[in-house]
Amino acid sequence: MSEIADALKSVLTRIGNFFDLFDLSFFVSGSVALGSLVFGAHLYGKQLPFRYEGWLRVLTIIMACYVLGLLCFAVGRSIRIPKKPATRYKKFEASFSKVLEAHGLSDEEPFKTQLARANHGNRRLYIRLWAEIRQRENLTPSLLVLNRYWVMAATYDGMVTALILWAVVVFIWWLGIGITPSLSFKIALPVIIALLFLAFICSREASRFVRNQVEELVATIAFERSRAR
């Protein structure tokens, strides 16, 4: 029975690794973004070039959602994170140091030495903590939570871009850029404002999940060190 359980565990691990490779979080924003492109093309009396039929058409749509999701994630995260590396690292290092201090780790070794190093010691310590959790099997439940936080942050970052795309489509529909305007001001303006407000909320939620991820990471290391004592 143990051999069967080990074999089943190996199969499930491989399936999980496959879905980790094709992160399903990208499909959420990708499908919303694809919907805006399809509707925008419809306004101009055109269709997106999905020429295949049957399962090939389905596969093409799935891949289009995934690629668009990747692009939405990249754009959404670049909107949320400060553009200048110095500003970006400074903001992260201040927040990360505060979390370490709250858990009583900033004055312990090897954290104290690592934090004192030049070239963004905080950032490299953060990466090291991730490596420690990945290498310890008993911390797998915490790793799952950390991955969940990353997925949710990526999903919300992607949704920022997708909602902005919808706002652009509604704006074009309202002004009639290249088409006959058919959307009234009383409808278009509230919809555009609502879409942009939702994009702002999604960006804020992405930041919250990132903060929770840092808190969970440091709390896990602090718990493991206290248990080792």
Image: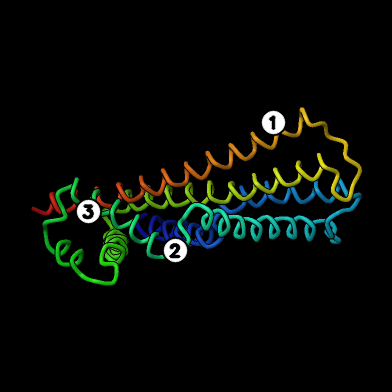
Q: Position of residue 186 (x, y in %)?
A: 77, 27
Q: Position of residue 102 (x, y in %)?
A: 19, 45
Is residue 210 found left or right of 165 in the rendered image?
left
Q: Position of residue 110 (x, y in %)?
A: 15, 64
N-terminal of the two: label 1 or label 3? 1
Residue furthest toward the top?
A: 186
Is residue 23 found left or right of 174 in the rendered image?
left
Q: Residues within 10 Å of mark 1 (few under 14, many from 20)?
A: few
Image point (71%, 59%), residue name: 64
Numbered disc 2: secondary structure: loop
Is the residue 122 above or below the residue 151 in the image?
A: below
Image point (87%, 53%), residue name: 47
Is residue 99 found left or right of 229 in the rendered image?
right
Task: Quickly name the residue at label 1.
Answer: 190
Q: Nearer the viewer, residue 197 or 45?
A: 197
Task: Quickly name the residue at label 2.
Answer: 84
Which image quadrant is residue 118 in?
A: bottom left
N-terminal of the two: label 1 or label 2? 2
Q: Nearer the viewer, residue 113 or 189?
A: 189
Q: Determine whether label 1 and label 2 are within 8 Å by CB.
A: no
Task: Quickly name the residue at label 3.
Answer: 221
